[in-house]
Image (cartoon, grey):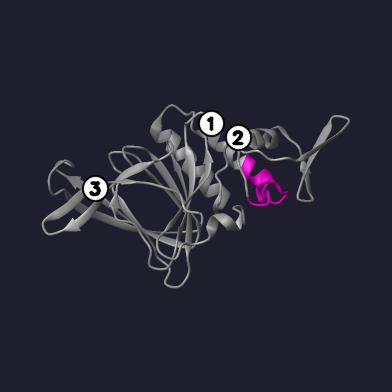
């Protein structure tokens, strides 16, 4: 099972020469910086320590450090805009950043894998993998902000406006617009503008997206279409092996 980057136990070799330190994991050497130290203290990895290899660790550490600073912005709009800018900057060139274990599609449904849980509870980072033909029901984010970015492929995002009350027996929505987003393109969902669907827009390849939530999203409401409207249903969320 792919483990999130939080609270792990791992033995690595730390070497110090003068004022310089380095680490070794699976035969790979890297500079033991303050960012690496923080990453080690707050992360969990069970799959051959790949995120501590030189190809991954500095990039992930830098990405999470930027998010740490961004989520402390007081204004919600400014915070989401800053997170959106970080995601676009990190992922726009299609560079490999995520380990392959995180981007494997599930044959029956889209995959959700926790990349990082902020120890202070300010945000979480979830990787989603959309196989061919896979997508979501119309859903919300339980009143929480979210910024989504395409890591690989292309997604279709359709937004909806709530008409009337969400507590009605049959909930009413008005479809607003559909956006196609490719690699490095990001968007923010800030309540009350949070109702949407997501689907893989590629006909023959999976798509991978990165989602930053205002906390660890453990449930949401989905809306199942039927005659005369949508039926609201609470859906508990889990992570994919």
Separation of disc 2 and disc 3 at Cα? 34 Å
At a point 83% along the width and 33% down the height, the residue shown is 20
Give the mark, 1 or 3, whose residue is nearer the N terminus.
Answer: 1
Q: Which mark is residue 42?
A: 2
User: For the residue labelled by badge 1, is the local secondary structure a helix, a strand or a loop?
Assistant: loop
Residue tagged by mark 3?
A: 233
Mark 2 and mark 3 residues within 8 Å of each other at the beta carbon: no
The residue positioned farthest toward the bottom in the image shown: 204
Q: Is residue 90 left or right of residue 168?
A: right
Q: Is residue 74 left or right of residue 67?
A: left
Provide the residue span drawn in magenta: 47-61
Question: Does residue 93 appear in the picture of this structure?
Answer: no
Separation of disc 2 and disc 1 at Cα? 7 Å
Q: Position of residue 186 (x, y in %)?
A: 45, 50
User: For the residue labelled by badge 3, is the local secondary structure a helix, a strand or a loop?
Assistant: strand
Q: Position of residue 95 (x, y in %)?
A: 61, 56
Residue tagged by mark 1?
A: 119
User: For the residue labelled by badge 2, is the local secondary structure a helix, a strand or a loop?
Assistant: loop
Separation of disc 1 and disc 3 at Cα? 30 Å
């Amino acid at each position: 099972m792919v483990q999130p980057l939080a609270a792990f136990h791992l033995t690595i070799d730390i070497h110090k020469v003068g004022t310089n330190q380095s680490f070794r994991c699976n035969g790979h050497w890297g500079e033991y910086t303050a960012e690496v130290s923080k990453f080690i203290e707050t992360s969990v990895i069970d799959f051959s320590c790949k995120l501590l290899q030189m190809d991954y660790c500095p990039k992930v550490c830098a990405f999470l450090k930027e998010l740490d600073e961004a989520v402390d912005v007081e204004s919600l709009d400014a915070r989401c805009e800053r997170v959106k800018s970080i995601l676009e900057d990190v992922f726009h060139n299609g560079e490999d950043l995520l380990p392959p274990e995180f981007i494997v599609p599930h044959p029956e449904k889209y995959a959700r894998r926790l990349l990082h849980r902020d120890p202070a509870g300010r945000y979480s980072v979830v990787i989603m993998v959309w196989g061919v033909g896979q997508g979501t029901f119309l859903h919300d984010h339980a009143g929480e902000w979210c910024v989504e970015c395409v890591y690989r492929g292309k997604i279709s995002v359709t937004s909806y406006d709530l008409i009337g009350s969400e507590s009605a027996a049959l909930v009413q929505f008005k479809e607003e617009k559909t956006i196609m987003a490719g690699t490095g393109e990001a968007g923010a969902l800030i309540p009350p503008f949070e109702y949407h669907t997501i689907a893989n827009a590629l006909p023959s390849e999976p798509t991978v997206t990165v989602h930053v939530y205002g906390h660890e999203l453990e449930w949401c409401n989905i809306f199942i279409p039927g005659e005369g409207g949508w039926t609201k249903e609470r859906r508990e969320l889990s992570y994919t092996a």
